[in-house]
Each structure stands twice: as structure tokens, then as C-alpha cells.
Image (cartoon, rainbow, N blue to C red):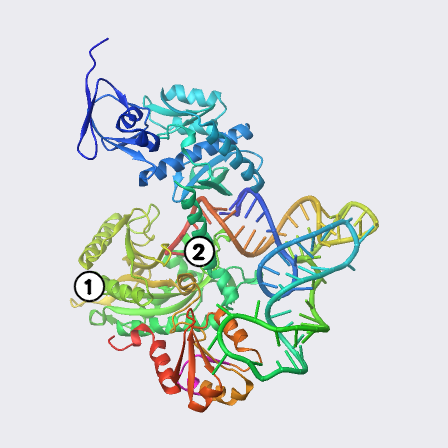
RNA sequence: GCCGCUGUAGCUCAGUGGUAGAGCGCGUCAUUGGUAAUGACGAGGUCGGAAGUUCAAUUCUUCCCAGCGGCACCA
């Protein structure tokens, strides 16, 4: 036997093991201990994830990945995708496979097949997957020359795979993985065998359409989504989380709590009911106070504007498809999809001096956008909505300070709504855009300079800027960890030029101002949807549609209930009275289900002593207080965060 | 817009080639009860819309609309 080179492997604890020749992760794991061998999933070799079966031929730093490691989940899910594909190929041989990555919480695989998969098919496929896991097929890695691989998959009738491989640079070796009779192109790594995926740790979730290569010009494939976890317990916990999220669905709560509704005759346009509109108005009043505090002036501009303005602003060219249009007096009119061109019209009235800048014009602007029908989603994506929109007209020198102040205002507002975690994204020039590169360079630099001075961390979002300028996007995280992009600040050197906005500078020359488009909530509709889900319908007192219900034990207290109710109303509290001849149990149950934050019960005792017994939502405790004390307490708590003392 | 699924009472849903049912809610009456369901009775539906097949369609077929899950889109 040749004298083989010794291989030294360094483990994470710093210890090292020497082998007489090339060694696989499996052998290493077995060498360390049978427990580790059993739990091993893959191995990290010099920072790169490898299969356990791959030979390590030189000294390396290694770490065995076991089921308990975070990294294992991704491998597990990727494997589940392969097992799914294998099951589908076995059951429906006429199907072509395409791609199947691991994703957050699970995996999917896209298939090309004439007949659609049904939900019944999912049950059958799931069963076959379990059988494949039982077979415990070895997963074998191999390499193949690119051209050979293209031929290999073409011959097999897998046109999509062949197309994918053909796109890989020539001469490059590609890796294939085989399990049973199923072979797939894959970077890896994979589990040693299919049996390593727990039979009761995965579940197929849904079938959906998805475009080949994510391009809507391409044919549509059938995507099967699944979820996979390390343990049955984790799977159950995940399914439970989904159920909990469903309970806070704003569409469901909106109906239950009579906040708003939609109907066929106005698809994507909410009808706000009294309760929902109350919340809306609280939010609007709050934002109005904040805008006043930060030096904004509120305006109101038309919803229907002549096409010629949209042509000048550039919207007609770029967004015509998404604009509602109509005609009157022989003129073509369009509903505004945004407010900026109208705000420039306000700016353009009269001569503006540099002394007037920055000019901050705010509008709760009612906009319409013809969104694709498939995009509509409750309040989150609508066709008519109102933005907390404003445009700051300023000089180039003022961009930095205006951005800084805006960020402060935005964080303050998010905090008041209970959102402490905010991410910032910087979107730079998109491919289709207005304006020359020099202007884009300048505006991107100005924005970058501004955001770095705020000290906020941000990530890049390349190519996602507006057609007229780069932007910052503000993303908040809700109570169950979901991200929502709400706020935005966009630098715009172009619209003021196009719409001929000018001011007289200190040099007595005319200049175009810079426009900062900015919103904090984004759309009220969507933000209310987020708030409903954030609070699961149990709003804090300042937002709750009904803040307190007053009710008696028997009808003997009706007069007193009315007296208490009148006092609450006089104090500006959103109170209701319940004089129905129902038992107290019944009324408590009903108002608790309606998520009313406070219930005042007045019995014979309270009526004589002029007290109320207070029951708060979510608590079974009762507290009897003097009426004045109770009302003052409620009133203090009903104040919006910015109206409380100390702000 | 694309793929798939769904559309029955105010809500949640069952059901059928011979023009429909439950629970909750709603109304009336009785009950006056101390913190998550008092009882009785009653009203309420051209079964999403249009066309077709059929002696007969809510049920089968086609088209349209809307909703849901994704994909694409999101100034």
C-alpha cells in the first residue's frame, strides 16, 4: 500500500484527530462516538458545508453538523424537497422536475405537469414521502461535466433541468445527488440517507402556481409547499403558530368587530364602519398633531386631475396602466395615484423665496391605484387608500437635516404605536428611470450622507428606487415577528424640474427645489390592518372604538347606568350603555368577546354609593372605585401617547 | 394579470338533478339574574351573476364576477 499522507482534522474545541488517509465526515463522527455518528447530518470543512460521505483529503478545520444545529434545518428542508420530488416522480412519471429550495419554515418544489395537483394528491404524495423515508435510501453525491449533464437530463426528458445546467459556465463540473432512482442537480450538501428526515416532522402545505424562473412571461409551473422541522414537537409548534396568526387576521377581525367591509361592486376599496372609522380617526388625529409639532402645513388637493398634468409629471408614461381614468367636458382625467404633482401645484402658486424653505406640505391624500386583481389582500393591498403623505420642498443643503429630523419623527411615531424594532433599507437607482446619471449620483450621495448622519443602521436594496429618485424604506416588526414596510423617504430632483417648481435663491437666481417625498404610516388602510393584527383586535384604550360599556345588574339601576354613561360621554370617553334585560354573565361575555377594554358594572350597591365595579378585558379581577376616580383613571389612560404628560 | 381552490340566511358552515337545513346572531314575549351563554316562540335565502344541457338545475357544463392560497406586480 502507498504511504498515504496523514490527515489532521481540527475540531471546534481545538482538539485534533489524525487519520492515515482521506477520511469522510461519517468516519470522523463514528471515530468520535456512536452518538455523534447517529446524530450527524453534514460537516463543515474549512467553513464550507460538505456531505458526510465526501472525502476530506487535506488537513482541515471541521465541525460536525448535528440535528440540533441551526444549519441542520436548512439541509433537512432541502432534503425534504428532494424526497418530495422523488415521490412525485414515482407517482406521476410524466412530471418534469425543476427547482426545489429550502425556504423559511420549510421548502417547496416546482413541477411541470399538465394535470394540476389537487389537495387530495398532497395526501398521497405525503404518504409516498414517508415510504421513501422508511426505505432510508442512501444519498450519493457525484460530479459530472456540464455538457454531459445537459445531455444526461435531456435524454431523461427533463428539459427544465437541462436548461438550468446549460446556463452554468462551460467546463465547470456540476454536482448531482442520487437517492433511489431519483437524480437531481444540486449544490448540496445533503443528509447521508433519506431516513434522516423524521417521518412525522414534515407536512405538505399547499399547491400554488409559480412562473418558471420567476418571470411572468414564462409558463406557469405547479409549486408544492411543505414545512419541515427537526422534531415532531417543532412541527406542531409551527402549525400552532400558523393557527394563532390566523386568529389575528385583520379580515376576520374586521368582520367580527364590524370595523369595515368589502363588496364586489368596489373590489379592493374598503367601506369603513363606525367602529373602524373611529380607530382611523384616532390615528389620523394623532398624525396631524405630530405633523403640526414637526412644522408641516396640511393641505387638500383634487382627486381627479387632467391627464396633461400626469403627462408632465411622467406618471402617464410609466403608470398609465395603474391609473383610473374618466372623461368629462371632452377632457381626459385621471384619479390621482399619488399626491406629489398636486403638491407641486400648491408650491407653484406665487413666488417662493429660499427664506420659505423648507416648505413641508402634508396631505391625507385619497388616492386610487388600479392594482392587479390577484394582488388585492384585505386592507393590506387596496385600490383606494389614504396616505399620510407629505412633500418637503427644500434646498440641496437641507436634505441632510430634513432627513435626520424625519427619521426622529418616524421613530417617535412607531414607538407610540408600540413598534420598537425598525429596519432601514436604502434603495438606489432602478433600471427604468427618469433623469441623467449625474443627477442620480448627486441624489444618492445626498441621501447616503443624510442617513449615515442619523446613525441608523441600514441595508442596501439595489435597483429598488423610485423612477424619480433613490429612497429610504422603513420596516417595522410586529408582535409576531413579521416585517412590514411602512415609512419611506424619497429624494426627488426630477419632479420639481418637470413641473417647473422654482424658488428665488439668496443669489437672486431661480432654482429648482429638491422634493422629499415622505410617508410614515404609508397608507392608513394598510397601517390599520397592521394595527389590528398587532393587537389581535384588543386595542389599547386610546384606539379602541368603544372604550367602556356601562351596564347594570338589574333594571332597577337603569337610571344610574344612564347617569354614569352621561358623565363618561361628557368627559369625551367613547362609552356605550347596555340596558338589555340580560343576565350580567351574558353581558360580560358578549362585551368581552367584542373586545371592549373596560366594563363598568353598576349594581344596587354601586348605585347607592356612587361607585362602579370595573372589569378590564383580559382580567377576571373586579375593582370597585368611586365614580370620579374611575372616570379620571380611564380618561388618563385614554389619552394618545403624545398627549400624556411628559411629551 | 397567471395557476389552483372556493362562493348556500347577517356570521360560521352542512346538504341535494325534483325550487333548502343547523348553530350563533336578529325580533317578540316571559325572566330582574353580582362578572364569559335564562327560556319559549318567530322572522329571514331568485343557493355569486349570465347562458347552456334536461321534463326539471342551487346541484351538471361554459363564460363572467368576487374571495382565498401562491406567483408576477407594488410609483
- Identified at 20% across, 60% down, the residue is A400
Q: In this view, does A123 lie above or below A152?
A: below
Residue position for label 2: A245
- Asked if residue A265 shows in the view, the reply is yes
Q: Nearer the viewer, residue A451 or A309?
A: A451
- Taking the magenta stretch, the answer to whether it contains residue A198 is no
Residue A2 sits in quarter: top left
Q: In this view, does A342 lie above or below A169?
A: below
- Alpha carbon separation for disc pair 2 and 1: 40 Å
Residue position for label 1: A401
Question: Percent from the top left, x then y, of residue A29?
Answer: 29, 28
Chain for disc number 2: A
Q: What span is in magenta?
A: A567-577
- Taking the magenta stretch, the answer to whether it contains residue A571 is yes
Q: Nearer the viewer, residue B27 or A289?
A: B27
Question: Percent from the top left, x then y, of residue B8?
Answer: 65, 59
Left or right relative to B42: residue A134: left
Residue A122 sits in quarter: top right
- Other residues around mark 2 within 10 Å, as few (<14) / some (14–19) / many (≥20): some
As drawn, which residue projects farthest toward the top? A1
Q: In this view, does A509 lie above or below A163?
A: below
Q: Do the residues labelled 2 and 1 touch (CB within 8 Å)?
A: no
- Of the 4 image quadrants, the one containing the C terminus of chain A is bottom left
Amino acid at each position: 500500500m502507498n504511504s498515504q499522507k496523514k490527515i489532521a482534522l481540527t475540531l471546534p474545541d481545538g482538539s485534533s484527530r489524525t487519520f492515515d488517509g482521506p477520511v469522510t465526515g461519517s468516519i470522523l463522527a463514528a471515530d468520535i462516538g456512536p452518538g455523534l455518528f447517529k446524530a450527524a447530518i453534514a460537516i463543515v470543512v474549512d467553513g464550507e458545508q460538505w456531505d458526510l460521505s465526501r472525502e476530506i483529503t487535506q488537513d482541515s478545520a471541521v465541525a460536525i453538523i448535528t440535528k440540533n444545529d441551526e444549519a441542520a434545518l436548512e439541509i433537512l428542508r432541502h432534503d425534504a424537497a428532494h424526497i418530495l420530488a422523488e415521490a412525485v416522480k414515482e407517482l406521476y412519471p410524466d412530471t418534469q422536475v425543476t427547482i426545489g429550495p429550502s425556504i423559511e419554515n420549510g421548502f417547496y418544489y416546482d413541477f411541470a405537469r399538465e394535470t394540476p395537483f389537487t389537495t387530495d394528491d398532497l395526501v398521497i404524495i405525503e404518504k409516498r414521502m414517508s415510504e421513501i423515508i422508511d426505505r432510508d435510501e442512501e444519498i450519493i453525491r457525484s460530479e459530472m461535466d456540464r455538457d454531459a449533464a445537459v445531455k444526461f437530463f435531456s435524454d431523461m426528458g427533463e428539459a427544465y433541468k437541462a436548461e438550468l445546467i446549460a446556463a452554468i459556465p462551460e467546463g465547470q463540473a456540476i454536482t448531482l445527488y442520487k437517492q433511489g432512482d431519483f437524480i437531481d442537480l444540486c449544490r448540496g450538501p445533503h443528509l447521508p440517507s433519506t431516513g434522516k428526515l423524521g417521518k412525522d416532522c414534515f407536512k405538505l402545505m399547499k399547491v400554488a402556481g409559480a412562473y418558471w424562473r420567476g418571470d411572468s412571461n414564462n409558463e406557469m409551473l405547479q409549486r408544492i409547499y411543505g414545512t419541515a422541522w427537526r422534531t415532531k414537537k417543532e412541527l406542531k409548534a409551527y402549525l400552532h403558530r400558523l393557527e394563532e396568526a390566523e386568529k389575528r387576521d385583520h379580515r376576520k377581525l374586521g368582520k367580527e368587530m364590524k370595523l369595515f367591509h368589502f363588496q364586489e361592486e368596489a373590489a379592493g376599496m374598503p367601506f369603513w364602519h363606525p367602529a373602524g372609522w373611529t380607530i382611523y380617526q384616532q390615528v389620523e388625529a394623532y398624525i396631524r398633531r405630530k405633523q403640526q409639532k414637526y412644522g408641516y402645513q396640511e393641505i387638500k388637493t383634487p382627486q381627479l386631475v387632467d391627464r396633461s398634468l400626469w403627462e408632465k409629471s411622467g406618471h402617464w408614461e410609466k403608470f398609465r396602466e395603474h391609473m383610473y381614468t374618466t372623461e368629462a367636458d371632452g377632457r381626459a382625467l385621471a384619479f390621482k395615484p399619488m399626491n406629489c404633482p398636486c403638491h407641486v401645484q400648491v408650491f407653484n402658486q406665487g413666488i417662493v423665496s429660499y427664506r420659505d424653505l423648507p416648505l413641508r406640505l402634508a396631505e391625507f391624500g385619497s388616492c386610487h391605484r388600479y392594482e392587479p386583481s390577484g394582488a388585492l389582500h384585505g386592507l393590506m393591498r387596496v385600490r383606494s387608500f389614504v396616505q399620510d403623505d407629505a412633500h418637503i420642498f427644500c434646498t440641496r443643503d437641507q436634505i441632510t437635516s430634513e432627513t435626520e429630523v424625519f427619521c426622529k419623527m418616524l421613530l417617535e411615531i412607531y414607538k407610540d404605536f408600540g413598534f420598537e424594532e425598525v429596519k432601514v433599507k436604502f434603495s438606489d437607482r432602478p433600471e427604468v428611470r427618469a433623469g441623467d446619471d449625474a443627477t442620480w449620483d448627486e441624489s444618492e450621495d445626498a441621501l447616503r450622507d443624510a442617513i449615515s448622519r442619523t446613525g441608523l443602521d441600514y441595508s442596501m436594496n439595489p435597483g429598488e428606487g423610485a423612477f424619480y429618485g433613490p429612497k429610504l424604506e422603513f420596516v417595522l416588526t410586529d408582535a409576531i415577528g413579521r416585517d412590514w414596510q411602512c415609512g419611506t423617504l424619497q429624494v426627488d430632483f426630477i419632479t420639481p424640474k418637470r413641473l417647473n417648481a422654482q424658488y428665488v435663491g439668496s443669489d437672486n437666481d431661480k432654482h429648482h427645489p429638491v422634493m422629499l417625498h415622505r410617508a410614515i404610516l404609508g397608507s392608513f388602510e394598510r397601517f390599520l390592518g397592521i394595527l389590528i393584527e398587532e393587537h389581535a383586535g384588543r386595542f389599547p384604550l386610546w384606539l379602541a372604538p368603544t372604550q367602556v360599556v356601562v351596564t347594570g345588574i338589574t333594571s332597577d339601576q337603569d337610571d344610574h347606568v344612564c347617569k354614569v354613561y352621561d358623565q363618561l360621554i361628557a368627559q369625551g370617553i367613547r362609552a356605550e350603555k347596555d340596558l338589555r334585560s340580560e343576565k350580567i354573565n351574558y353581558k360580560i361575555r358578549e362585551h368581552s368577546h367584542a373586545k371592549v377594554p373596560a366594563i363598568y358594572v353598576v349594581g344596587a350597591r354601586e348605585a347607592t354609593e356612587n361607585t362602579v365595579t370595573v372589569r378590564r378585558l383580559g382580567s377576571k379581577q373586579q375593582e370597585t372605585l368611586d365614580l370620579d376616580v374611575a372616570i379620571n383613571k380611564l380618561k388618563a389612560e385614554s389619552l394618545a401617547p403624545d398627549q400624556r404628560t411628559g411629551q
